[in-house]
Amino acid sequence: MRRTPPAVPRVSAGTSSRAGAAATLGIAAATTVATLSLAAGKKSTTDAEGLGAAPEPSLSSPPPQVFLNVPYDATYTFVRVRFNGFRGRGFGRGFGRGGGPGWAHDYPYADQNFIKILDEVTMLGPNTTGTNIIDADDPELHRYPIAYVSEPGEWAPTQEEVDNVAHYLLKGGFLILDDFRSDREWRNVEAIFNAILPGHRFRLLELEEPVFNSFFQIETLDLPPPTFGQYRPAFLGLHENDDPEGRLMVVANFNNDIGDYWEYSDLGYFPIDLSNEAYKFGVNYVIYALNR
């Protein structure tokens, strides 16, 4: 096993000079996030090894491949993308770290917990009755302005997925890539988006990028990964027309996994300050995307 962190992929640094809306976190919001991070809903657990292997979701999780999507009603609904992976789209056993494909990791708790936070700290009024899973090649994706992609390093896109996601992004859609790491996975993601958006390249995002100031004032991009700490995290993005001053279409939480922080925030498994920071990034992504 490599003990030295691999280098962050060589990408061009962005030079955005736009000023984002810098709304700093007030005491009330901070208290709310901290309270919800420890909200009841799952029993606490003991770390298994060092920081520990994450506990498996309870047996009350939905049975494999049964997803109770909520109907479209024009309110913000959390959407997770199901894609064709190297092992297909189906489940092996269970969800998240209990098994199954990468696109479903941390489902459903990460999705549900994030919506609770978004509803509590903003006036957005998101759909709190459920979350949706939509296939990457499904035109239904176009009805939802923001979508979350877990483990894109496992994505083996079909031509239908490439075409649909390209149209989605060019029409104003926004993708959040999360829970992937290593040079190998990065090369796969880069190749995928070279096919989806030819002529666009990922750039390292700096703290001044508007997405980091769209709601919360993010103070640092140094959010340590909850697992696989040997990797150095970085935030990267694809901008419309490959213009660093243009609309951010894709944000990549590379060498990180904010979904893990969301999933286990009500267990006290990770430090509450780090869970709160992970929520801030997610809230900012949503507010940014809905205002661009």
Image: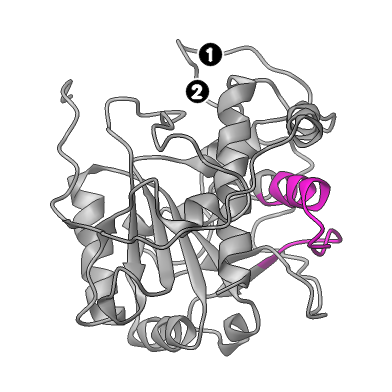
- Residue at screen point 16% across, 35% down: 6
In the image, 78 versus 55, the foreground residue is: 78
Is 78 on the left-hand or right-hand side of 164?
right
Q: What stretch is highlighted in magenta?
A: 111-132
Residue 138 left/right relative to 205? right
- Residue 262 lies, in percent from the top left, at 63, 39
Q: In the image, is 271 to the left or to the right of 130?
A: left
Looking at the rendered structure, the number of numbered marks drawn on it comes to 2
Give the quarter of the figure containing the C terminus: bottom right
- In terms of secondary structure, where does tag 2 sit? loop
Residue 262 part of the magenta segment: no
Q: Is residue 42 left or right of residue 200?
A: right
Asked which secondary structure carries label 1, the reply is: loop
Q: Does the magenta stretch include residue 115?
A: yes
For the residue marked with disc 1, what is the amino acid? Ala
In the foreground, 155 or 18: 18
Tell me the residue at 74%/51% (across/down). 118
According to the image, label 2 marks what residue? 53
Are the residues at dot 2 and dot 1 in contact (C-beta closer than 8 Å)? Answer: yes
From this viewpoint, is residue 101 visible?
no
Q: Which residue is drawn at 33% across and 48% down?
A: 206
Residue 270 is drawn in which quadrant? Answer: top right
Q: Is residue 256 visible?
A: yes
Comes first in the chain, label 2 or label 1? 1
Q: As displayed, is residue 3 above or below residue 138?
A: above
Q: Where is residue 81 in the image (x, y as percent from the top left)?
A: 54, 67
What distance separates the C-alpha of mark 2 from that of mark 1?
A: 6 Å
Label 1: which residue?
A: 48
